Image (cartoon, rainbow, N blue to C red):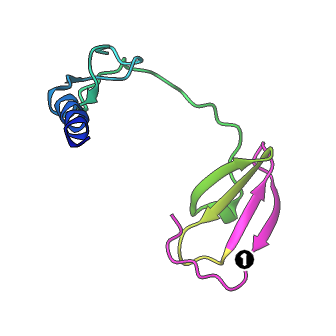
Amino acid sequence: MFKFIFFLFSIGISGFYFGQSGCTDPQAQNYNPAAVINDGSCVYAITNFSPVLITDLPANLAENSGMTFLNNLIYSINDGGNATILNELSQNGSLIRDIHIDSAQNVDWE
């Protein structure tokens, strides 16, 4: 039994040490299908993207530090020094309501 376990362990170690490294991402330009260890060498095509401005945010969101999209609404937080408020916005950026978070401190919410 010990020999069998040692055999399996040896195969596992040899695969780790002798596995080919390279780019393992099929979306990369230099994808290597033989690579089993990602060595961080992946190269990607240059992309150009020009975001479209939908609207300017309300003035009280001048210190916006983060946004998330959930249930067709946008939620925004402001940076430290501001009140502990979560802003709820419509998809076009209009403020729906401020959600006050009781018993919380805003210390650089990023």
Q: Residue drawn at (78%, 70%), measured in percent from left and top?
A: 99
Q: Position of residue 87 (x, y in %)?
A: 73, 63
Which quadrant would residue 22 be assigned to in this image?
Answer: top left
Instruction: Name the residue nearer the viewer: 80 or 15.
Output: 15
Q: Which residue is mark 1?
A: 101
Instruction: Name the residue nearer the viewer: 60 or 102.
Output: 102
Vertical position of residue 96 compared to residue 51: above or below = below
Which quadrant would residue 37 be assigned to in this image?
Answer: top left
The quarter of the picture where the N terminus appears is top left
- Secondary structure found at label 1: loop
- Count the marks: how many? 1
Residue type indicated by callout 1: Ile
Vertical position of residue 6 compared to residue 44: above or below = below
Which quadrant would residue 98 be assigned to in this image?
Answer: bottom right
- Is 54 placed left or right of 22 in the picture? right
- Is 30 placed left or right of 83 in the picture? left
Q: Residue drawn at (15%, 32%), measured in percent from left and top?
A: 17
Residue 89 within the magenta-colored segment of the rendering: yes
Q: Residue furthest front?
A: 1
Dot 1 alpha-carbon crowd within 10 angstroms: few under 14, some 14 to 19, many 20 or more:
few
Q: Residue drawn at (58%, 31%), measured in percent from left and top?
A: 51
- Is 109 placed left or right of 20 in the picture? right
Instruction: Name the residue nearer the viewer: 10 or 91.
Output: 10
Q: Residue drawn at (60%, 61%), measured in percent from left and top?
A: 62
Q: Residue furthest bottom?
A: 103
Q: Position of residue 31 (x, y in %)?
A: 31, 15
Q: Position of residue 79 (x, y in %)?
A: 55, 68
Q: Position of residue 5 (x, y in %)?
A: 25, 40
Instruction: Name the residue nearer the viewer: 5 or 39.
Output: 5
Residue 34 within the magenta-colored segment of the rendering: no
Please give the range of residues in magenta: 85-110
